[in-house]
């Protein structure tokens, strides 16, 4: 079994992105492009990976962490020069082959990496590059083949002849090299082109001149070559990735009657028979069970949504929503909530850092913060927990089957016992015992005939 290592080129700046951020940290489906690339490399079975950083290198390093090796390219003198900066890493590695790829081409996948590797081994090549035919080859290096179909050269767009510019098979920027042949090619590279850069693609000619075999593995999945140099291309990559995720979900049994505004992070599982409606974003570590209806207009981040859940116009973060619960329209479930099963959260309700147990109902205009709510509790309209005293947050505890009347304030810390009943409009500052009725408001007085005598309105004389 051969051993392989990889070098990811990520020293380019974000000039065309008009961003202070390193270009490779620009996001596709909420994930930086370089993570897509690194994940594909790891999924192909390579664990020894060096990232060449330059512009905003510290950002890249602190984002990617310690499981990678790093090489720094102080001056960006081309892709060949970038790989030269990783020579120490390459020489120290006991790999037989080196995979080199661009950090700004996120749609690469493990399959393509593995298939290209097989071709590389089968043809006993010194270099195997991945190519694809694209409808618009502008900007890419063109793959020049001999009449027998052998890879001869890569002509960079700006250096290509008019004839070469008509070729639509382009270089993806992903290469497999035999390690020793790569080291040799780098030693021979010269910056002899229009840009005065060291082109990694010149390795093809150098290795042919040395009498070695070269090949181009042409993939049918042309998306793998696409890179993002500006925000328009970034949007196009987002759109491709978005539709790939949605197609995969539809094929696996998720109903998406209209894809407008639906963005689902790659890897978010959605169960069989669930329906996702327009303008719904599912991201982070979110998981969705079966037979749910999410949307329209939901933003769900890092949530576990169990089965048969219905959410409409809901924003939810870092929470769990259990079986057969529903929320919305217009509800906000903030971090730290455990909701359900069978819980109903209705219009204009905000819940934060709270547990609501089986069958409890919060139908309208309510705030529940830092609370432990038992089973079968009913919150009347406009009731709320007063969890903050200006300095500290306190918890509210409501036991099973308690009934909270409309417009109740619960001054935490406070406990309402099971089956307790709170009269509407109460401000509860003391614990309420189980089965008690609590009334905490001024008694009503009616002043008979007051209006007739006082005549407080216009035109009453
Ligand atoms: C490169 C290829 C081209 C191919 C295209 C695919 C060369 C000469 N050309 O062109 O054939 O079709 O990729 O996208 O290799 N980088 C560095 N240091 C540098 C220059 C670049 O780290 O000095 C990194 C960039 O961050 C980027 C990658 O290398 O991740 C590619 O560089 P870029 O300048 O975008 O190359 P292209 O002109 O697109
Ligand atoms: Ca590029």
Image: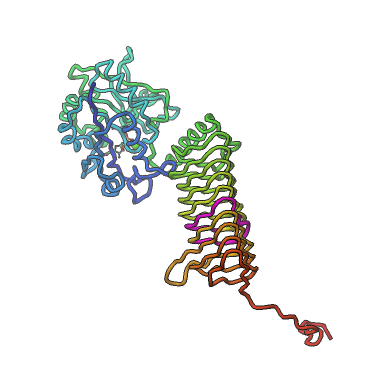
Looking at the image, what colour scheme do you see?
Answer: rainbow
Q: What is the quadrant of the N terminus in the image?
A: top left
Labels in figure, total: 0
Q: Is residue 39 magenta?
A: no
Point out residue 334 in the picture as x, y percentages from the top left corner.
49, 55
- The answer to whether one can see residue 382 in this image is no
Residue occupying the far right of the picture: 461
Residue occupying the far top of the picture: 148
Residue 390 position by quadrant: bottom left
Point out residue 403 in the picture as x, y percentages from the top left corner.
62, 61
Residue 48 against residue 310 in the figure, above or below: above
Which portion, as a residue range, is magenta?
A: 350-369
Point out residue 10 in the picture as x, y percentages from the top left corner.
29, 40
Ligand 2 quadrant?
top left
Q: Looking at this view, is 290 or 426 the one in front?
A: 426
Q: Residue at x 22, y 40 (%)?
A: 69
Q: Looking at this view, is 81 or 259 the one in front?
A: 259
Q: What is the quadrant of the C terminus in the image?
A: bottom right
The prevailing secondary structure element of the residues shown in magenta is: strand
Residue 112 against residue 359 in the figure, above or below: above
Q: Is residue 364 magenta?
A: yes
- The answer to whether one can see residue 429 in this image is yes
Residue 220 position by quadrant: top left
Point out residue 210 in the picture as x, y percentages from the top left corner.
17, 19
């Amino acid at each position: 079994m051969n051993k392989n290592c990889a070098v990811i080129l990520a020293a380019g700046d974000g000039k065309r992105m008009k961003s202070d951020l390193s270009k490779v940290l620009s996001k596709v489906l909420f994930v930086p492009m370089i993570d897509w690339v690194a994940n594909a490399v790891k999924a192909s079975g390579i664990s020894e990976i060096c990232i060449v950083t330059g512009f905003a290198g510290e950002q890249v390093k602190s984002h990617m962490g310690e499981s990678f090796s790093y090489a720094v390219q102080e001056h960006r003198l081309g892709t060949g020069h970038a790989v030269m900066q990783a020579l120490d890493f390459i020489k120290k590695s006991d790999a037989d082959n080196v995979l080199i790829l661009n950090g700004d081409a996120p749609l690469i996948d493990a399959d393509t990496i593995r298939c290209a590797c097989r071709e590389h081994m089968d043809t006993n090549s010194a270099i195997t590059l991945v190519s694809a035919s694209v409808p618009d080859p502008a900007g890419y290096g063109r793959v020049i083949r001999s009449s027998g179909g052998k890879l001869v050269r890569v002509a960079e767009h700006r250096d290509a002849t008019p004839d070469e510019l008509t070729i639509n098979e382009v270089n993806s920027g992903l290469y497999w090299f035999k390690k020793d042949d790569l080291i040799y090619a780098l030693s021979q590279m010269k910056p002899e082109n229009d840009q005065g850069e060291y082109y990694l693609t010149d390795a093809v000619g150098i290795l042919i001149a040395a009498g070695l075999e070269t090949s181009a593995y042409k993939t049918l999945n042309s998306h793998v070559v696409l890179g993002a140099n500006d925000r328009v291309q970034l949007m196009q990559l987002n759109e491709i990735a978005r539709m790939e995720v949605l197609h995969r979900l539809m094929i696996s049994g998720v109903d998406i009657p209209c894809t407008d505004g639906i963005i689902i992070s790659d890897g978010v599982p959605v169960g069989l028979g669930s329906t996702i409606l327009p303008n719904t974003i599912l991201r982070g570590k979110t998981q969705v069970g079966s037979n749910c209806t999410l949307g329209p207009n939901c933003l769900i981040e890092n949530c576990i949504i169990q089965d048969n859940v219905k959410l409409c116009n809901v924003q939810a973060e870092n929470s769990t929503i259990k079986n057969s619960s529903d929320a919305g329209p217009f509800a906000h479930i903030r971090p730290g909530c455990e909701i359900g099963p069978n819980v109903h959260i209705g219009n204009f309700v905000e819940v934060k850092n709270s547990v609501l147990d089986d069958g409890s109902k919060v139908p309208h205009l309510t705030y529940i913060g830092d609370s432990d709510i038992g089973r079968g509790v009913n919150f009347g309209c406009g009731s709320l927990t007063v969890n903050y005293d200006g300095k500290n947050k306190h918890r509210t505890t409501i036991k099973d089957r308690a009934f909270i009347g409309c417009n109740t304030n619960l001054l935490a810390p406070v406990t309402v016992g099971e089956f307790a009943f709170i009269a509407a409009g109460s401000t509860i500052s003391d614990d309420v015992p189980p089965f008690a009725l609590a009334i905490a408001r001024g008694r009503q007085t009616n002043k008979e005939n007051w209006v007739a005598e006082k005549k407080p309105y216009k035109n009453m004389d």
